[in-house]
C-alpha cells in the first residue's frame, strides 16, 4: 500500500522562509530512517504558492489563476510517498516525523494512493497495459 504524507503549509512556508540547517538535518535523518526501513518512495518540499498556478476546468474552458493563494491551511508545503503494509503503519511514520514547522502548530495529512487493483473491472486490460507502458517509460528516464 502506498500513502502520501502531505505536509501542510503555514505562513512562513508561504512567505518563502527556508528551513534552517538544523531542520534540514533533522529532515534528512528522518528521510534516511524511512529509506533504511525500505518504506520511502519519494519526498520533497514545495516552493510557495506565489510561484504556482491553478487551472480551473469549467466544461471545455480552462481558467488559470496565478498564486499566491490565500488559504494557507489548505496548501501543501511538501510530501513523502511511502510504501507500507497498512494505514496504521503510515500513520505511525507520520507520527514519528519531526514537526515540519518548529515553533508552530503543524499538520501532516495521510492519504492512501490508488493502486490498479482498486479499480476492479473498470480497469480494462487495455487501460492496464497503457498504465504499465507509461510506468516503464517513466522508470527508464
Image: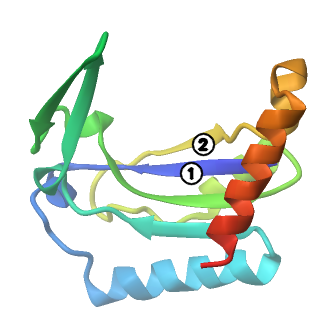
Label 2 vs 1, first from the N-terminus: 1
Instruction: Identify residue for label 1.
Output: 5
Classify residue 25 as left or right of residue 53.
Answer: right
Instruction: Name the residue located 56 percent from the left edge and 64 percent from the top edge.
Output: 97
Instruction: Identify residue for label 2.
Output: 110
Residue nearest the viewer, comparing 11 with 131: 131
Marks 2 and 1 in Cβ contact (< 8 Å): yes
Q: Crowding near pointer 1: few (<14 within 10 Å), some, many (20+)?
A: many
Residue 126 locus on image (x, y percent):
82, 35
- State whether residue 123 is above or below residue 42: above
Instruction: Name the residue located 11 percent from the left edge and 34 percent from the top edge.
Output: 65
Under circle 1, the secondary element is strand
Classify residue 74 as left or right of residue 141.
Answer: left
Classify residue 107 as left or right of residue 136.
Answer: left
Residue 3 locus on image (x, y percent):
68, 48
Residue 19 locus on image (x, y percent):
26, 76
Residue nearest the viewer, comparing 58 with 30: 58
Dividing the image into 4 quarters, which one contains the C terminus? bottom right
Under circle 2, the secondary element is strand
Residue 119 locus on image (x, y percent):
81, 26
Amino acid at each position: 500500500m502506498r500513502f502520501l504524507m502531505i505536509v501542510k503549509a503555514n505562513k512562513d512556508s508561504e512567505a518563502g522562509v527556508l528551513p534552517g540547517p538544523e531542520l534540514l538535518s533533522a529532515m534528512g535523518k528522518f528521510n534516511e530512517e524511512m529509506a533504511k526501513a525500505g518504506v520511502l518512495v519519494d519526498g520533497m518540499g514545495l516552493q510557495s504558492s506565489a510561484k504556482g498556478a491553478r487551472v480551473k476546468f469549467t466544461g471545455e474552458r480552462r481558467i488559470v489563476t496565478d498564486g499566491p493563494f490565500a488559504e494557507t491551511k489548505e496548501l501543501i508545503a511538501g510530501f513523502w510517498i511511502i510504501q507500507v503494509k497498512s494505514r496504521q503503519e503510515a500513520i505511525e511514520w507520520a507520527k514519528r516525523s519531526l514537526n515540519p514547522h518548529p515553533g508552530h502548530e503543524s499538520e501532516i495529512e495521510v492519504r492512501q494512493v490508488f493502486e490498479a487493483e482498486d479499480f476492479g473491472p473498470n480497469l480494462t486490460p487495455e487501460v492496464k497495459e497503457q498504465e504499465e507502458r507509461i510506468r516503464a517509460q517513466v522508470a527508464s528516464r
